[in-house]
Image: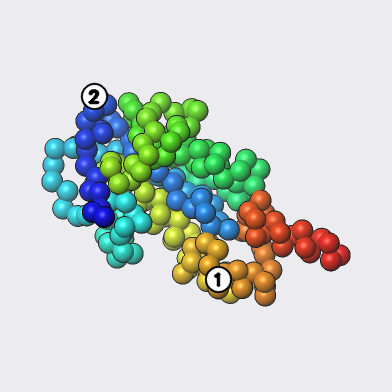
Amino acid sequence: MQKCVPDFSLENLTGFNLVAGVDEAGRGPLCGPVVAAAVIFPQRDVEIPIVIRDSKQMTPRMRAVAYDWIVNNTIWAVAQASVSEIDELNILWASMLAMTRAVNSLSVTPQHCLIDGNRVPADLSGTPVVRGDARSLSIAAASIVAKETRDRIMTDLALQFPQYGWDKNAGYPTKSHLQAIEIYGINQHHRKSFGPIKERIKNEVAQN
């Protein structure tokens, strides 16, 4: 199947100049925050010298190069929702909260937002775009910034907790991560509302 190449078609259809693409990273991991980014391209009629597409289709090196270009050539912001907020609100609403925070952190107020997914956070004015990171350059750029930021957070946490391999698995439930949880238990960065973590806590309580 041919990969989609995002462009500015959706941004141009809005009729606005200041259009923010918004995406998040980290809904699936067992630990760490969920991170959202908002990106506005101040000019959409210039050639972009690097590859920007859905961050999941890019190698780590490609993402790093794209990230550096994006943060130096666009209006952007990142924000997050903490593990405690994820456990309190659930991951969907925590993701919405992180997106709202990212948009509100922009240095300019966007006239419209293109939100990756099928819903728009209640406090934002925008359009949901399913598979938006494969269709909109602004959303694709936001997906890159969000993923790079979150990966760096998890790499930093891995320095404190090397036994979980977070610098490699980013907190996702890989076999090695689940094995590490079995051996070393959980800590304050694990999401206690997520199935494998909730089950472990339940078993520990039952044993005591």
Sequence-first disc among 2 and 1: 2
Residue at x 32%, y 26% (from the top left corner): 111
Residue bearing mark 1? 175
Residue at figure coordinates x 37%, y 39% from the top left: 130
Dot 2 and dot 1 residues touching (CB under 8 Å): no
Quadrant location of the C terminus?
bottom right
Q: In this view, does 121 lie above or below 51?
A: above
Tell me the residue at 79%/64% (across/down): 204
Q: Which mark lies nearer to you, 2 or 1?
A: 1
**Residue 174 visible here:** yes
- Give the alpha-carbon distance from disc 2 to disc 1, as whole Å: 47 Å
Q: Quadrant of residue 31?
A: bottom right
Q: Position of residue 23 (x, y in %)?
A: 40, 43
Three-letter code, disc 1: Lys
| Position of residue 152 measured from the top left corner of the image (x, y, whole percent) | 44, 61
User: Dot 2 lies on which element?
Assistant: loop
Task: Name the residue located 50 percent from the left edge and 28 percent from the top edge.
Answer: 122
Secondary element at tag 1: helix
The disc label shown at residue 15, or none? 2
- Residue 133 higher or lower than 187, as above or below: above
